[in-house]
Amino acid sequence: MKFLWTAQDMVTAMAGRPFGTLPEGITGISIDSRTISPGEAFFAIKGDRVDGHDYASIAMANGAALLVVSEAKLPALGRLTVPMIVVEDVLVALEKLGMAARERTSATVIAVTGSVGKTTTKEMLRVALEPSGKVHASVASFNNHWGVPLTLARMPIDTRFGVFELGMNHSGELGPLSRMVRPDVALITTIAPAHLGNFASVDEIAQAKAEILEGLVTGGDVVLNRDNPYFPILDQAAANLGIENIHTFGQHAKAEFQLAEFDGAAESSTIWVSFGGETREVTIGSPGRHIAENALAVLAVATLVGADLDGAIAALAQPVAVKGRGVRHKLSIGRGVLTVIDESYNANPASMRAAIAVLAAAQPQGEGRRIAVLGDMLEMGTFAEDVHAELAGPLLAAGIEHIWLAGPEMVALRDALPDTVQVEYRPDAQQLAEFAVSAVKAGDIVMIKSSNGIGFSRIVSALLDKYPVLPDTERRI
């Protein structure tokens, strides 16, 4: 059997203490007792709301090969018959194992951050690099203080490319993650007013995002968006760290990887990319200029890491579904089709505008409507009322005439919209879901977007529960 880790290597890396007869090795790592697979190690991490030690017996029942537990909790777990590695702090032990995984592999490691597009870009990198070798990438949005070390610790020793998403809500969070990952290439997709309530300005957001550069290996590469107005801050931050290999992408005349032309369609797009003295035509299996810009960044990274560019370009032509980030569902309704674009995972002013643009380009069938279903953008602080009201401009410019809203902050947008558009407002996602399932019609295209904490995923679920999903129709944007 091929092990992810031998038990002895885990003990050594984590400076742990064996308790019981350890297995020869483990096949995977889990922090969720409900989904652990037989043969995996369960790390009993103590989170903000739950303590993994409370679920150790469930992990054992579900086939955990061993448990990683804290010394302080061991007396309460003495009756469990599964072997354990005992450590002072389970999360710190996971971090140590993650750093050991980074040390033992010869993989080229790429770290991605940005105010918008992190997860989509990470997924695009994963599929673009797969033709060139074994890729290990973050699951979903495992981009925080536990998700990053977990993803690192899960990285097989024979990985060719490691792709890691790094996220933050406050200053001082990205630096430690970057030093853990030690990227060979660091990519910052863009800077925009996300988590604005935690910062005094977008300049501060740019400075916090620049922390991803702190862990870059000596001689590593940085990839920056040359079109972004905060590029000078990032460029200066790289220079201050003595980083010499600074690469740029965008439409800007000085961009090293230049977007020469963009041709957007309803469900795909084509770009022409100029770099290295040549221009390549690239078809992207998804719509939206923001996705095209992400693809441009992906091609820049693929070039820098020596990947098969033809293989990467071919891969980008295929749609890749990312739950809550633009997956398209085609549903059967009456004698027609209802299209649901699920953007329910995250939202900030920049991503809202991008999603509205994609909805504007979509083509309803028959008498179908373009419907924007929007919920609150969280962590906007004192800027909340203004940034929500300002969405009226892009909605009207895009010609969106049907706008369904929920959430306390969306009152500002409701009040900013004129009587020329049809607005439905409900206090919360559940009430809007109940309205939506009865109000949609054949031919409609419904784009659902909000911050995850607002719970708009239940609107998506309500529609999918009510109307049958047509096979082979999921697409991402």
Image (tube, helix red, strand yellow):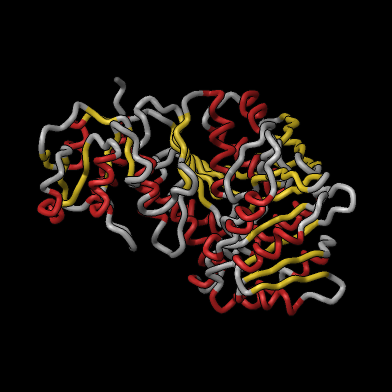
Tell me the quarter of the picture where residue 94 sits.
top left
Percent of width and height locating residue 97: 27, 40
Residue in the foreground of this view, choosing between 381 and 67: 67
Q: Residue at 63% across / 66% down in the picture? A: 375
> Along the horizontal axis of the image, is 218 left or right of 454?
left
Residue in the foreground of this view, choosing between 467 and 405: 467
Look at the image and tell me in which quarter the N terminus lies: top left
Percent of width and height locating residue 80: 15, 44
- Examine the rendering and report whether any part of residue 333 can be seen: yes
- Examine the rendering and report whether any part of residue 231 can be seen: no
Tell me the quarter of the picture where residue 152 sits.
top left
> Along the horizontal axis of the image, is 396 left or right of 453?
right
Percent of width and height locating residue 416: 75, 77
Q: Residue at 69% across / 69% down in the picture? A: 405
Q: Residue at 82% across / 66% down in the picture? A: 396
From this view, report whether residue 152 is shown above or below residue 276: below
Look at the image and tell me in which quarter the C terminus lies: top right
Q: Residue furthest top?
A: 1
Residue in the foreground of this view, choosing between 248 and 439: 439
